[in-house]
Amino acid sequence: MVAAIVVDSEQRILMAQRADWQHQGGKWEFPGGKVEPGETITDALLRELKEELGVTVLISEPFMTLQHDYGDQCVCLAVYRVTSWRGEPSGMEGTALSLAAAC
């Protein structure tokens, strides 16, 4: 799995709300998703942000890798920090988006 910490010029972080029908539905998350077979993590990051937000990533860097066990599912997340992109982020799949001030 890949996730993106999308940080705008005002140091706000973009969050996406999971659809009610998804695992952990209704919760807020960093945008991202599954790495498809034969796809690099970077390719997955670019594809997922294009599909979910309608943006083209210009600058990204690895931030951290972590594992989390939800109890019913365990995931390994490659987290990237995205600081430059082309396009205006929007919920391409009907996803609610919110900008939160970084601490």
Image: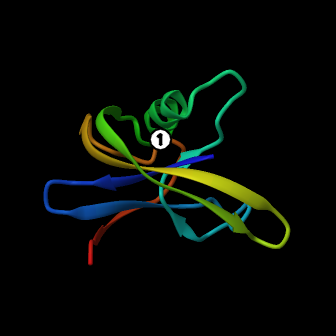
The residue singled out by tag 1 in the image is 92
In the rendered image, which quarter is residue 67 located in?
A: bottom right
User: Could you tell me which residue is drawn at 63 percent across and 59 percent down?
Assistant: 19
Crowding at label 1, few (<14), some or many (≥20) Cα neighbours within 10 Å?
some
In the rendered image, which quarter is residue 66 located in?
A: bottom right
Secondary structure found at label 1: loop
Residue 19 lies left or right of residue 85; in this view the side is right
Which residue ends up furthest to the bottom in the rendered image?
103
Scheme of image coloration: rainbow
Residue 23 lies left or right of residue 14; in this view the side is right
Kindly tell me whether residue 95 is visible in this rendering.
yes
Which residue ends up furthest to the left in the rendered image?
10
User: Could you tell me which residue is drawn at 45 percent across and 39 percent down?
Assistant: 49
Residue 75's place in the image compared with 56, above or below, is: below
Residue 31's place in the image compared with 100, above or below, is: above
Q: Nearer the viewer, residue 21 or 75?
A: 75
Q: Nearer the viewer, residue 14 or 5?
A: 5
Q: Position of residue 11 (x, y in %)?
A: 19, 63
Residue 59 lies left or right of residue 93; in this view the side is left
Residue 76's place in the image compared with 20, above or below, is: above
Amino acid type of the residue tagged 1 in the rendering: Met
